[in-house]
Image (cartoon, helix red, strand yellow):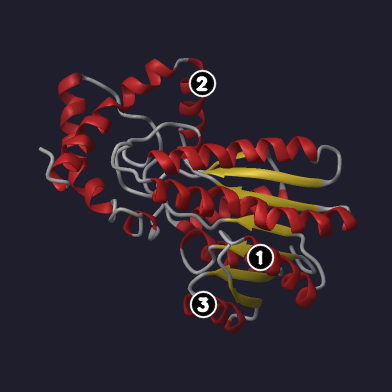
């Protein structure tokens, strides 16, 4: 049970963040929920309180340094402490490398990378004083592998993984844990709110074509578990809170494929080729480049 613990969750208005907020509240934690969409995060907090939990909703854009710091300071002022920080806020994009503008690159790193410093820096001050804490950064399989048509997001999530690894070493033997979570596909709004247009239509249309190409080439697709609900991902993160690990892979087959890529990148990429070819055909059709 997490009674007398305070958890701050960014990107808590929907998806993994909202599911995790409900779960931690059920475990007894006080949850501080942050998101840019105040009305949405208020709804999440209201459902939690109606169920008997304790929740505080705050409007916050963690890509802004002052907002991230204010979030942490307000959480401590209102709740007395911060025990768990979940950096969940994030956003993707939909474009080839040559179609990705400088503005998109900046935006991807502001929300997916720079925000990590904006919240973690102030949180560490409190955690070091109390001699305990857990910082959980939600990355993606895109933080471990290459994926086409969202290069800036892939680069940003690789940075999130690297940030967490460095943070872990700085916190060695301090009783403050750091974990990076690398989910595969999750049933959330992510693919519908990507910058450059929604990515979901490409996923939907390319699916049959990818399978056809894989069969024609006798190629096995990456053996990573399919789309998972945010509730199930949240459950796996809860288990990690009780038993901290350096990296958390939520989908079956994910860790094994990452190990394969680390050992033999070329071999791993061969499993991804049908995905690349299928999505490329649909991308060019959608963008009028065929």
In this figure, which residue is indicated by the disc labeled 2?
262
| SS for callout 1 | helix
In this figure, which residue is indicated by the disc labeled 3?
38
Q: Position of residue 67 (x, y in %)?
A: 63, 67
Q: Is residue 124 left or right of residue 14?
A: right
Image mark count: 3
Q: Residue furthest front?
A: 102
| SS for callout 2 | helix
| SS for callout 3 | helix
Rendered residue at 31%/29% (across/down): 221
Rendered residue at 60%/76% (across/down): 57
Packing grade of label 2 (10 A; few <14, some 14-19, many >=20) is few
Packing grade of label 3 (10 A; few <14, some 14-19, many >=20) is some
Give the Cα separation between the discs numbered 3 and 2: 41 Å
Give the Cα separation between the discs numbered 3 and 1: 17 Å
Q: Position of residue 246 (x, y in %)?
A: 67, 38
Which of labels 3 and 1 is toward the front? 1
In this picture, is 246 found above or below 88?
Answer: above
Which of labels 3 and 2 is toward the front? 3
270, 68: nearer the viewer:
68
Q: Is residue 195 left or right of residue 10?
A: left
Which label was assigned to residue 66? 1
Rendered residue at 51%/42% (across/down): 157
Q: Position of residue 168 (x, y in %)?
A: 73, 38
In this picture, is 238 found above or below 255?
Answer: below
């Amino acid at each position: 049970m997490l009674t007398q613990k305070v958890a701050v969750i960014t990107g808590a208005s929907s998806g993994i963040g909202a599911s995790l907020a409900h779960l931690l509240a059920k475990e007894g934690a006080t949850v501080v929920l942050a998101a840019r969409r105040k009305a949405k995060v208020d709804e999440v907090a209201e459902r939690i309180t109606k169920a008997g939990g304790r929740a505080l909703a705050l409007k916050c854009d963690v890509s802004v340094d002052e907002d991230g710091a204010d979030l942490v300071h307000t959480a401590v002022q209102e709740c007395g402490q911060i025990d768990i920080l979940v950096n969940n806020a994030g956003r993707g994009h939909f474009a080839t490398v040559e179609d990705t503008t400088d503005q998109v690159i900046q935006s991807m790193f502001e929300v997916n990378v720079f925000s990590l410093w904006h919240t973690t820096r102030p949180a560490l001050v409190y955690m070091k004083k109390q001699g305990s804490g857990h910082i959980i950064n939600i990355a993606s399989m895109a933080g471990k592998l290459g994926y086409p048509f969202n290069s800036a997001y892939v680069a940003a999530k690789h940075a999130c993984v690297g940030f967490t690894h460095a943070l872990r070493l700085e916190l060695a033997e301090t009783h403050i844990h750091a974990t990076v979570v690398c989910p595969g596909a999750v049933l959330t709004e992510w693919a519908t709110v990507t910058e450059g247009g929604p990515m979901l239509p490409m996923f939907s249309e390319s699916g049959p074509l990818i399978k056809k190409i894989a069969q024609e080439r006798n190629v096995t697709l990456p053996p990573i578990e399919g789309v998972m609900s945010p509730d199930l991902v949240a459950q796996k993160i809860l288990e990690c809170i009780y038993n901290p690990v350096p990296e958390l892979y939520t989908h079956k087959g994910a860790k094994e494929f990452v190990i394969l890529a680390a050992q033999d990148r070329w071999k791993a990429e061969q499993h991804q080729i049908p995905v690349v070819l299928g999505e490329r055909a649909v991308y060019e059709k959608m963008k009028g480049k065929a």
